[in-house]
Amino acid sequence: MRRIALFLALAALMTLVTSCGKKDKAPTVTVTELSPVDETPTYVFTHEDTVEVQTLVSQFIDRLDNKDIRGAVEQLHFLQGDSVRPLSPMFQRRQAMSMMNVQGVKYKMRQMVLRSNTNNEVKMEITLFEKPEGDKRPNTTAMYFRPVKFEGKWYLTVWDNITDTKSEDRLEK
């Protein structure tokens, strides 16, 4: 059943990617997760959902490009039970320290998967340093976001073991 949900999510993403160049009405992207009881779809995401998450990640990346780590970290939230909260000052400092340790020369969103209101994933690739052609040293790392849709609005949360209160639910694929 998880493979079916993953296949449907990938198919929906491919549909979105191939239709992004069209100026017609924005398509509805349906990501389906089948319920074990009644086998009905439970989540529907629109083009606007995708754009909103992409915009949040782009704003985060723009702040990092401008060396505004504080501004980037202030964008982050955490899922506490069934609500979304801004990071406390202590967690903001913790995230800022993490971001300082992986300051890069280039940031790029690599992957986005929307599964449900709380079980989503965005992978951001961080190029740590430019390297000459032929240099085989690794120069990239990744950061993962867990976008959450709460009361109709998207928030960026991070994938960690401290602020992610629904990690068991969110790790299901």
Image (cartoon, rainbow, N blue to C red):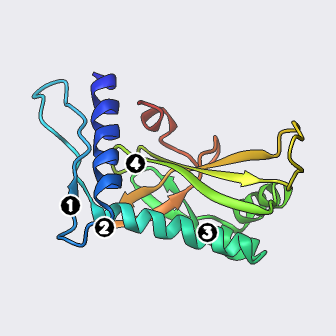
Cα distance, mark 4 to mark 1?
A: 22 Å
Q: Earlier in the sequence, mark 1 or mark 3?
A: 1
Residue on which disc 1 sits: 27
Task: Identify the image quadrant of residue 68.
Answer: bottom right
Q: Nearer the viewer, residue 49 or 24?
A: 24
Q: Earlier in the sequence, mark 4 or mark 1?
A: 1
| Residue 92 drawn at (x, y percent) | 71, 65
Residue on which disc 2 sits: 48
Which residue is at 74% across, 62% downward? 106
Q: How crowded is the residue under tag 4: few (<14 C-alpha within 10 Å), some, or many (20+)?
A: many
Cα distance, mark 1 to mark 2?
A: 9 Å
Which residue is at 18% across, 70% downward? 24
Residue on which disc 3 sits: 60
Q: Earlier in the sequence, mark 2 or mark 4?
A: 2
Labels 2 and 3 touching (C-beta < 8 A): no
Label 2: which secondary element? helix
Which of the two discs, 2 and 4, sits closer to the camera?
A: 2
Which of the two discs, 1 and 2, sits closer to the camera?
A: 1
Which of the two discs, 4 and 3, sits closer to the camera?
A: 3
Which residue is at 82% across, 46% downward? 139
Q: How crowded is the residue under tag 3: few (<14 C-alpha within 10 Å), some, or many (20+)?
A: many
| Residue 91 drawn at (x, y percent) | 70, 60
Cα distance, mark 2 to mark 4?
A: 17 Å
Q: Is residue 151 visible?
A: no
Residue type of the residue flagged with mark 1: Pro
